[in-house]
């Protein structure tokens, strides 16, 4: 298995908000990044969004124009999964759909170098299941970043039942190279962070559904009453309501406890396509740059 200091190139599967954030922090920390998505056009659009994020850091004097350019030079786009064979470390950040992730891990198991580590940014799907489908379960691990990736300090590292100690240590070291703090979690639905977060967000949906207050009241109550940086409904919009519903459903089904049942209002928002910030509408409305209207 690859050693921590041998990891030079990171393959990122998925150019959505999490994949872009991971690609950005990896490139900023000096790694070469290869980004793939359903098509090279989607991946290229993701790279453009990374350029915009770096541009904002230049505007705020957080990084120089030279660092921006060097970071961008480290990020490349390829056609698809079959082009990730040279990367020492692969991380999947595709939408939270089990069958999709299983197919990706099956393919990665076929194309990745023998000594590569295959990580998933999944927020709820079993790492053990993904590992089994890859055909090399000892090399498969969860590397769960928080949104927005460039700002949030934590990475939750999740070991599947057969994940090796070596894969765990290399993943911890890589997260530290990105400037992150890690925690270890068992491969049980929701891991640690979402086991805490999703019931809070779901309960906020119930509070709105039952008319306890307006969305603003609920968010202000949690922000100022509990000192959270964001209210639960605006945070649900940031995470994506489809993702929140998916994780809530996994907790409900796999832990079998009705306390996790997803709120009907959350289901309705997802059915309406009001998926949160990325869709321009969730519990709040947003412009096409994701700013609250
Ligand atoms: N991307 C990059 N940087 C961002 C950003 C984004 N999307 N949003 C904000 N930032 C940066 C800002 O540029 C700013 O940087 P600066 O200090 O260098 O100027 C800094 O973050 C602070 O931003 P703001 O001043 O605009 O606003 P806030 O002080 O309110 O911070 C926040 C924004 C960091 C998003 C803060 O509100 C926060 O921490 N919210 C909670 C986020 C959270 O809980 N995330 C975890 C979600 S759970 C998860 O991801 C797991 C998944 O599986 C569901």
Image (cartoon, rainbow, N blue to C red):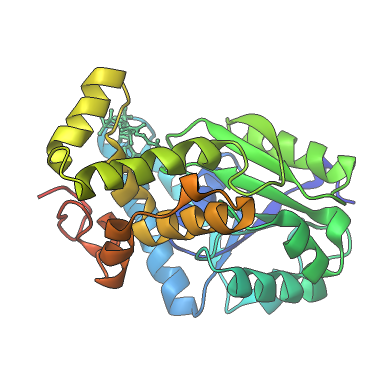
Nearer the observer, 243 or 189: 189
Nearer to us in this view, 213 or 293: 213
For the point 78% across and 50% down, the residue is 160
Tell me where residue 223 appears, x and y as whole percent.
Answer: 25, 26
Number of labelled discs?
0
Q: Is residue 206 above or below residue 38?
A: above
Left or right of 69? Residue 274 is left
Instruction: Write the residue at 47% across / 70% down.
Output: 43
Q: Is residue 39 above or below residue 120?
A: below
198 relative position to 35: left or right: left
Of the four image quadrants, the one with ligand 1 is top left
Residue 142 image position (x, y, % from top left): 68, 49
Residue sticking out furthest to the left:
293
* One can see residue 118 in this view: no
- Is residue 232 shown to the viewer in this render? yes
Looking at the image, residue 148 sits to the left or right of residue 285; the answer is right
Q: Residue at x 55, y 59 (%)?
A: 93
Question: Where does residue 64 sit, x and y in percent of width and height?
Answer: 38, 35
Q: Residue furthest front?
A: 258
x%, y% of residue 24?
49, 48
């Amino acid at each position: 298995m690859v050693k921590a200091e041998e990891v030079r190139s990171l393959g990122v599967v998925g150019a959505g908000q999490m994949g872009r954030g991971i690609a950005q922090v990896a490139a900023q920390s000096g790694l070469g990044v290869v980004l793939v998505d359903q098509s090279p056009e989607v991946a290229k659009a993701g790279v453009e969004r990374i350029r915009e994020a770096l541009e904002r850091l230049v505007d705020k004097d957080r990084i120089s124009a030279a660092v921006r350019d060097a970071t961008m030079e480290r990020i490349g786009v390829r056609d698809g999964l079959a082009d990730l064979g040279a990367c020492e470390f692969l991380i999947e950040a595709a939408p939270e759909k089990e069958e999709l992730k299983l197919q990706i891990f099956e393919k990665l198991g076929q194309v990745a170098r023998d000594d590569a580590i295959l990580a998933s940014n999944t927020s709820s799907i079993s790492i053990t299941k993904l590992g089994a489908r890859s055909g090399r379960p000892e090399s498969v691990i969860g590397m769960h970043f928080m949104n927005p990736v460039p700002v949030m300090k934590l990475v939750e590292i999740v070991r599947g039942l057969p994940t090796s100690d070596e894969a765990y240590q290399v993943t911890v070291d890589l997260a530290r190279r990105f400037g992150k703090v890690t925690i270890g979690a068992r491969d049980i639905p929701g891991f640690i962070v979402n086991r805490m977060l999703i019931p809070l967000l779901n309960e906020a949906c119930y509070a709105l559904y039952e008319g306890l207050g307006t969305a603003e009241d609920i968010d202000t109550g949690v922000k100022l009453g509990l000192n959270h940086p964001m209210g639960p409904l605006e945070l649900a919009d940031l995470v994506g309501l489809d993702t929140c519903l998916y994780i809530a459903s996994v907790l409900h089904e796999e832990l079998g406890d009705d306390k996790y049942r997803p709120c009907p209002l959350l289901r309705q928002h997802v059915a309406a396509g009001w998926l949160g910030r990325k869709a321009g509408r969730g519990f709040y409305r947003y412009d096409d740059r994701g700013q609250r209207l």
